């Protein structure tokens, strides 16, 4: 079976700064993979490389067995942005945000058809935001905001979901809702790559974990990756405190 | 004189009818575009491109090419130069914008001064609403209609680009292309509005209506109705007032837009200054009552 994501020895520089050093990541279909590393360890760079926003200097990236561009055009890649990357004052409603997930299914003027309306309603229902659909996006709580973007991925029918720090500033209940949703997505054959600081919740969330420090230090079972001596490699001294506080 | 006579009298002059037509078309077009510019944070870019098209317009005049073509070329040249200076030096974008557009604008001024022509510097700088010829009007109508049509048909893509260009990229769209199209439309719009209020005041029409509408609603779809509505209203008021008080027409049009903005800024039901203050006052009273 083709891998959902296959990054093979990708090296990325920003100017002279090395951001990714021969990083290799394989993500199978139907799995949730947690991406763990310090700030500046290359997590966002890895996401950008998978999405084709950055071209690696050396190495290869395959998404669903084809180039990132082809994968994007087929609507395979869904993406949940970091909080800081979103203009929460933008005059757009929750429903309109989720509808943008359907643009790949629409024609030249992006006029929604019946199927698009149904998909958006169903996605809103699944993340439990149907009653807030008309709200301006900034008027949601931290957890609801994330759920709105997860709903966009669901409406898009993407089979690969990339989530950059989705649990930052999110209450425990929303975190549980999102975790459950991502498990469902994986159980239906989707693949989820998620960067997180919440190490304690990692074993419930993910069945794979990656330790990143510009290089991929290890990839495997979350319990194994979370061993203190392994975390020490990625975070330096006193890893559990640091991870727990974040 | 009753109200109907008041409104009808200027319309007995062809030049006033044309002035009104050009004003309303330019105001609506600029206002629609301004909704995206304000949200993307391209207000300064609007300022830059609307000035930088000047040498393009003059050169097009000299070689007998369509004004829009010259404006497009120089609009893109300005954007490319701004990006180039920003990315290849330690200067920040605002400095790059300031250098590039003033230099191009000056180049346009110099070109006008050395070109023997009927081009009147004052008309280009401050607009020439009362001297619009039939040919000018047709150019404004055609250029305005094409630009308007593209803006409206592709509005969803422009809005997604403004809101989340990474998502646009993830869907296989080309955000750079969408941005470039929007900048091209900005250059075309500048040509249309130049006719009405002149190079210097174009930027007002490219910012004020969108900014006013943004303070009035939380829906982008409504912004796209409110902004051109307010702009058209301000345009009509401006032209009439300038007729009766015998003042600069372009100036009066922009002054009307500014006045409407002030009203919105103060009295917008949710975002307005007054509403904000009232809300704070009410909240404090509730807190004080609760404390007692």
Image (cartoon, coloured by chain):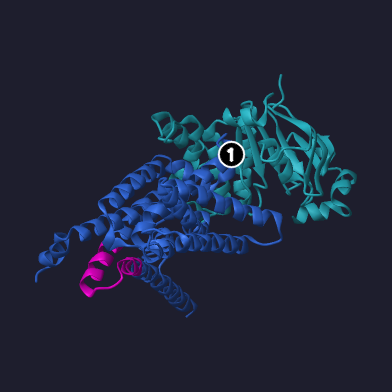
| Occupied quadrant, residue B122 | bottom left
Q: Is residue B191 left or right of residue B243?
A: right
Where does residue B196 sit, x and y in percent of width and height? 34, 59
Q: Is residue A111 left or right of residue A188?
A: left
Q: Residue at x 75, y 47 (%)?
A: A200
Q: Residue at x 72, y 25 (%)?
A: A3
Among the chains pictured, the one given cyan colouring is A
- Magenta-colored stretch includes residue B180: no
Q: Is residue A47 left or right of residue B167?
A: right
Using the image, determine if residue B236 lies above or below residue B72. below
> Which color is chain B depicted in?
blue
According to the picture, the residue beneath numbered tag 1 turns out to be: B169
Q: Residue at x 17, y 64 (%)?
A: B10
Question: Which quadrant of the figure contains the N terminus of chain B?
Answer: bottom left
Crowd band around label 1 with a 10 angstrom C-alpha radius: few (<14), some (14–19), many (20+):
many
Residue at the extreme left of the image, as rendered: B1
Near-viewer residue (A70 or A6): A70
Using the image, determine if residue B54 lies above or below residue B275. above
* Extent of the magenta region: B233-256
Where does residue A135 sit, x and y in percent of width and height? 44, 51
Near-viewer residue (B177 or A83): B177
Using the image, determine if residue A242 lies above or below residue B145. below
- Magenta-colored stretch includes residue B251: yes
User: Element at badge 1?
Assistant: helix
Residue at the extreme front of the image, as rendered: B116
Near-viewer residue (B21 or B282): B21
Near-viewer residue (A29 or A40): A40
Where does residue B224 sit, x and y in percent of width and height? 37, 51
Q: Residue at x 89, y 46 (%)?
A: A233
């Amino acid at each position: 079976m083709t891998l959902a994501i296959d990054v093979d020895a990708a090296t990325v520089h920003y100017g002279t700064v090395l951001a990714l050093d021969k990083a290799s990541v394989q993500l199978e279909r139907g799995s949730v993979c947690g991406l763990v590393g310090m700030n500046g360890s290359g997590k966002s760079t890895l996401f950008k490389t998978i999405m084709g926003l950055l071209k690696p200097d050396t190495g290869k990236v395959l998404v669903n067995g084809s180039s990132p561009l082809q994968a994007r055009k087929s609507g395979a890649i869904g993406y949940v942005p970091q909080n800081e990357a979103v203009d929460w004052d933008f005059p757009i409603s929750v429903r309109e945000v989720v509808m943008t997930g359907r643009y790949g299914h629409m024609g030249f003027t992006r006029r929604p058809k019946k199927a698009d309306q149904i998909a958006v309603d169903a996605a809103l229902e699944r993340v439990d935001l149907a009653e807030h659909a008309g709200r301006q996006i900034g008027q949601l709580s931290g957890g609801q905001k994330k759920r709105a973007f997860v709903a966009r991925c669901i409406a898009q029918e993407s089979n690969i979901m990339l989530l950059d720090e989705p649990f930052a500033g999110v209450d425990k209940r929303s975190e549980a809702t999102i975790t459950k949703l991502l498990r469902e997505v994986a159980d239906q054959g989707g693949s989820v790559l998620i960067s997180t600081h919440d190490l304690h919740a990692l074993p419930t969330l993910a069945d794979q974990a990656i330790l990143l420090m510009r290089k991929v230090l290890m990839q495997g079972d979350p319990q194994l990756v979370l061993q203190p001596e392994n975390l020490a490699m990625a975070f330096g001294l006193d890893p559990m405190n640091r991870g727990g506080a974040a | 004189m009753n109200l109907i006579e008041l409104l009808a009298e200027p319309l007995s002059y062809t030049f006033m009818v044309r002035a009104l037509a050009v004003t309303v078309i330019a105001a609506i077009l600029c206002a629609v575009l301004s909704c995206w510019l304000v949200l993307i944070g391209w207000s300064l870019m609007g300022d830059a491109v609307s000035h930088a098209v000047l040498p393009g317009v003059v050169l097009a005049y000299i070689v007998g090419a369509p004004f829009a073509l010259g404006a497009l070329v120089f609009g893109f040249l300005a954007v490319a130069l701004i990006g180039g200076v920003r990315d290849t030096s330690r200067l920040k974008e605002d400095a790059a914008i300031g250098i590039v557009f003033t230099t191009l604008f000056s180049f346009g001024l110099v070109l006008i001064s050395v070109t023997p022509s009927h081009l009147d510097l004052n008309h280009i700088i401050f607009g020439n609403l009362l001297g619009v010829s039939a040919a000018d009007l047709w150019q404004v109508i055609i250029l305005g209609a094409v630009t308007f049509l593209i803006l409206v048909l592709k509005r969803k893509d422009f809005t997604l680009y403004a809101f989340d260009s990474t998502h646009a990229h993830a869907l296989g769209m080309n955000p750079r292309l969408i941005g470039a199209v929007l900048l091209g439309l900005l250059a075309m719009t500048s040509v249309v509005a130049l006719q009405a209020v002149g190079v210097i005041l174009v930027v007002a029409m490219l910012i004020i209506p969108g900014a006013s509408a943004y303070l009035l609603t939380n829906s982008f779809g409504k912004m796209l109705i409110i902004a051109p509505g307010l702009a058209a209203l301000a345009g009509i008021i401006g032209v009439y007032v300038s007729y009766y008080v015998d003042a600069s027409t372009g100036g009066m049009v922009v002054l009307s837009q500014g006045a409407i903005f002030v009203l919105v800024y103060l009295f917008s039901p949710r975002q307005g200054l007054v509403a904000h203050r009232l809300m704070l006052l009410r909240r404090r009273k509730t807190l004080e009552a609760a404390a007692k």
